[in-house]
Image (cartoon, helix red, strand yellow):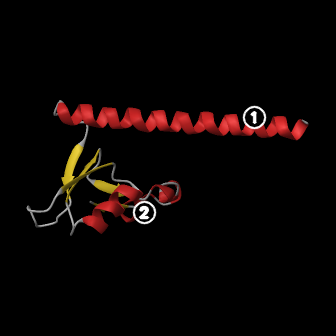
Amino acid sequence: VGSGNSLKIIILFSLNLFLTILLYIYTRLLDAADAILNSTDKFTSVICRSGNDHLPTLVVIGGGFTGSQICKTLQNEFKVILIDSKDYFEFTPSVIHLVVNPLHQHKIKVLH
């Protein structure tokens, strides 16, 4: 009986965490759309080079691991527009290395 209750608690906790993350992502997307529509400087629009204006346009919000990879992979099939707060990709797992070696900063940033 006890393990069944703990399983229900874990499932409810997981569902609550999932919904919280989903709400956070939705809020960030709304912020990005609002910034674009109001032309604020909060977000930078970066066009990944495709060279073909006759291709359909793909808008990617967020230049993290997945957003950067999508842009790179699909830049020959779409005119890709990447919207991010920075004009570079930052390898965040390596940020902790900056505490020990501040000169490592140029190695963790790559321009979009």
Quarter containing the N terminus: top right
Q: Which residue is mark 2?
A: 104
Kind of residue sitting beneath label 2 = His
* Residue on which the image places disc 1: 9
Q: Position of residue 112 (x, y in %)?
A: 26, 60
**Nearest to the observer: residue 60 or residue 91:** 60
Earlier along the polypeptide chain: callout 1 or callout 2? 1
Determine crowd level at label 1: few under 14, some 14-19, many 20+ residues with C-alpha closer than 10 A.
few
**Residue 40 visible somewhere in the drawing:** no
* Local crowd size for mark 2, using a 10 Å CA cut-off: few (<14), some (14–19), many (≥20): some
| Vertical arrangement, residue 42 with respect to residue 108, above or below | above
Lateral position of residue 92 relative to residue 45, left or right: right
**Rendered residue at 73%/39% (across/down):** 10
- Give the side of residue 106 with respect to residue 56, left or right: right
Question: In terms of secondary structure, where does tag 2 sit?
Answer: helix
- Amino acid type assigned to the residue bearing label 1 in the image: Ile
